Amino acid sequence: MHVHANPAGSARTKRILWFSMLATLVYVVLTLVAGIRAHSLALLSEAGHNASDFLALALSFVAVYFQTRPANPRKTFGYQRAGVLAAFLNAATLIVISLWIGVEAIHRLSEPVAVHPHIMMTVAAAGVLMNGVIAALLWTVARDVNMRSAFIHMAGDTLSTAAVIAGGFAIQLTGQNWIDPVLSILIAAMILWSSIDIVRETLNILLEGTPRGLTLSHIREDMQSIEGVLNVHDLHVWSLGSQSHALACHITIADIPPSESNCILLKINAMVKHNFHIHHTTVQFEHLGCCEELEGCVVPISELAAESSHDHHHGHSHAH
């Protein structure tokens, strides 16, 4: 079974990512300048956050490009994990940034800095509009972990910039500058929480763990419920990409004709595709009793290898 890319969907995704990168880059420059003028850590943290978003969107764009490339003899599964790797790097970068924001905010709590709430609110309002539009566009193509991580970036930005507006309004009303670093800590905590979840999922895929939401015992039970399947062992399930799963196993069946075993194989493939969305399977049949007959009926592998080696050398001497 094979999984094919969707060129039309990929072209639309690329257009959305191009627009998102351009808009984010403009906003990064605006937020950085405004944060310096307003002495606002919340705005500077937003600039850092949006700079990481620009890199995240760029990585996602590169990943989408690679994912559309076909498989070849060197990359037999294609480049399906390019998006997973991009999502991992995006999330890891965000974790570092959130920790930096937290440290800076704690430092500011001990040494408060006067901020300009009007500049904070004006720039943040522009950010809510921009990030909201980008997040809405990304949501329409967020079908895998790569695009989902990009969507989380922008949705998080929308919420954090809205929080900056609220913080600026509170500072304007009360004159309490500690609101700015506290707001930064809340933003950092939100970024950290969403990023850790992405890191866990992508690491599980890269380490070929069992895909999220799948349980080997359930898969084994459903396979063994198929008529003709006596036992399922050496069962492995892993992810090729965030939406593409693979399965390999050994299945014990009775000593039956190949036509009947092929029928069992078709039922197994249809079941795992329907029940567990697994589209790539490798199933090896073992006939009941073959292990008991191995010593009496089959020449040991070591003897076959020795005989093959002897024949090879014998033929080689004749050639000369």
Image: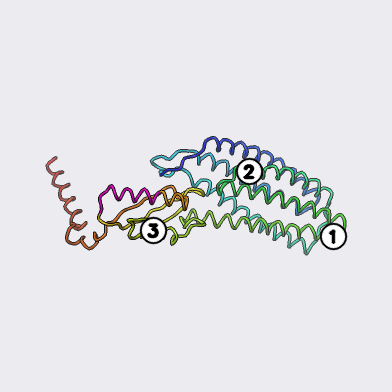
Amino acid type indicated by mark 1: Gln
C-alpha distance separating marks 2 and 1: 37 Å
Q: Earlier in the sequence, mark 2 or mark 3?
A: 2
> What residue do we see at 49% from left, 55% from top?
211
Pinpoint residue 259: horizontal percent, then vertical percent. Answer: 28, 47
Of helix, strand and loop, which one carries label 2? helix
Q: Which residues are magenta?
A: 256-269
Quadrant housing residue 135 = top right
Q: Nearer the viewer, mark 1 or mark 3?
A: 3
Query: Tag 1: Cα neighbours inside 10 Å, few (<14), some, or many (≥20)?
Result: some
Pinpoint residue 73: horizontal percent, then vertical percent. Answer: 38, 41
> What residue do we see at 87% from left, 58% from top?
175
Q: Earlier in the sequence, mark 2 or mark 1?
A: 2
Q: Residue furthest bottom?
A: 110
Amino acid type indicated by mark 2: Leu
Of helix, strand and loop, which one carries label 3? loop
In the image, taking residue 30 as reference, residue 61 lies left or right, namely left
Is residue 261 shown in magenta? Answer: yes
Q: Quadrant of the N terminus?
A: top left
The residue to which callout 1 is attached is 176
Is residue 200 shown in magenta? Answer: no
Q: Is residue 150 above or below residue 114?
A: above
Total numbered circles: 3
Proximity of marks 2 and 1: CB atoms separated by less than 8 Å: no
The residue to which callout 2 is attached is 138
Q: Nearer the viewer, mark 2 or mark 3?
A: 3
Majority SS type along the magenta span: helix
In the image, taking residue 188 as reference, residue 149 lies left or right, namely left
Query: Tag 3: Cα neighbours inside 10 Å, few (<14), some, or many (≥20)?
Result: few
Q: Earlier in the sequence, mark 1 or mark 3?
A: 1
